[in-house]
Image: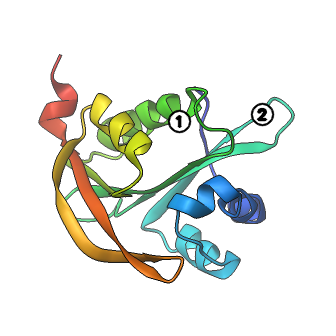
């Protein structure tokens, strides 16, 4: 699985991927400026996966990489064409990066309550359900619940 660390030059392609109909349903919509501030702020790392011809087909954001608590958030993962296994491969690599390269003690994420496909994927890779964050996000003008999930370093290291 090839992931490379994204650069500010990748932000227009990341924003375009974020604006696809599938992504808009389950992913927050950030401006280019917000992404640029985030990628250059020092506490986030963006990763991209590219096709053989250099087109970004997926991206992910890890945040909190400088936290003393060693709790890293998987803020976002977006795949251009879902249900082909790419998201699973990327998520496995992100888990490895978080624990083995970035020294995470805890990797956590939130997911829309109605995104059962993503919740199933996270659970299948070892993320544990922690609870509901009520009315934690707005989508299409209405408040939505998010499910909080995490994986601890000890769970990652279990055979």
Circle 2 Cα neighbour tier, 10 Å, few/some/many (<14 / 14–19 / ≥20): few
Residue, x 76% and y 58% (percent of image)?
A: 13
Give the camera-side residue of 128 and 53: 128
From what the image shows, is residue 53 above or below residue 158? below
Residue 141 location (% of width, % of height): 50, 83
Instruction: Tell me if residue 65 can be seen.
Output: yes
Residue 115 image position (x, y, % from top left): 42, 51
Q: Is residue 51 left or right of residue 76?
A: right
The answer to whether residue 125 is seen in the rendering is: no
Q: In the displayed structure, would residue 137 be above or below residue 92?
A: below
Label 2 secondary element: loop
Give the residue pinned by disc 1: 87
Q: Residue at x 74, y 45 (%)?
A: 56
Q: Quadrant of the N terminus?
A: top right
Residue 123, percent from left and from top? 28, 36
Placement of the C terminus among the 4 image quadrants: top left
Q: Residue at x 61, y 72 (%)?
A: 35
Query: Of discs 2 and 1, which sits in the foreground?
Result: 1
19 versus 89 height, above or below: below
Q: Residue furthest right?
A: 53
Horizontal relation, residue 46 to residue 71: left or right = right
Whichever of labels 2 and 1 marks the residue nearer the N terminus, that label is 2
- Mark 2 near mark 1, Cβ–Cβ under 8 Å? no
Per the image, label 1 sits on a secondary structure element best described as helix
Task: Identify residue for label 2.
Answer: 51
Q: Residue at x 47, y 69 (%)?
A: 42
Depth order, front residue of 128/138: 138
Tell me where residue 82 sits by quadrant. Answer: top right
Label 1: how many residues lie within 10 Å, few (<14), some (14-19) or many (20+)?
many
């Amino acid at each position: 699985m090839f992931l490379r660390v994204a650069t500010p030059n990748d932000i227009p392609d990341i924003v375009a991927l974020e604006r696809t109909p599938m992504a808009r349903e389950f992913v927050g919509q950030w401006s280019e400026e917000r992404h640029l501030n985030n990628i250059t702020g020092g506490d986030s790392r963006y990763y991209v996966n590219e096709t053989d011809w250099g087109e970004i087909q997926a991206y992910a954001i890890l945040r909190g990489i400088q936290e003393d608590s060693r709790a890293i958030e998987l803020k976002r993962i977006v795949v251009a064409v879902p249900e082909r296994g790419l998201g699973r491969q990327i998520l496995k690599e992100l888990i490895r990066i978080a624990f083995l390269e970035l020294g995470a003690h805890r990797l956590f994420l939130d997911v829309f309550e109605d995104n059962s496909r993503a919740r199933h994927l996270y659970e299948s890779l070892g993320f544990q359900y922690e609870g509901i964050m009520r009315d934690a996000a707005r989508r299409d003008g209405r408040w939505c619940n998010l499910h909080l999930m995490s994986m601890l370093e000890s769970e990652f290291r279990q055979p």
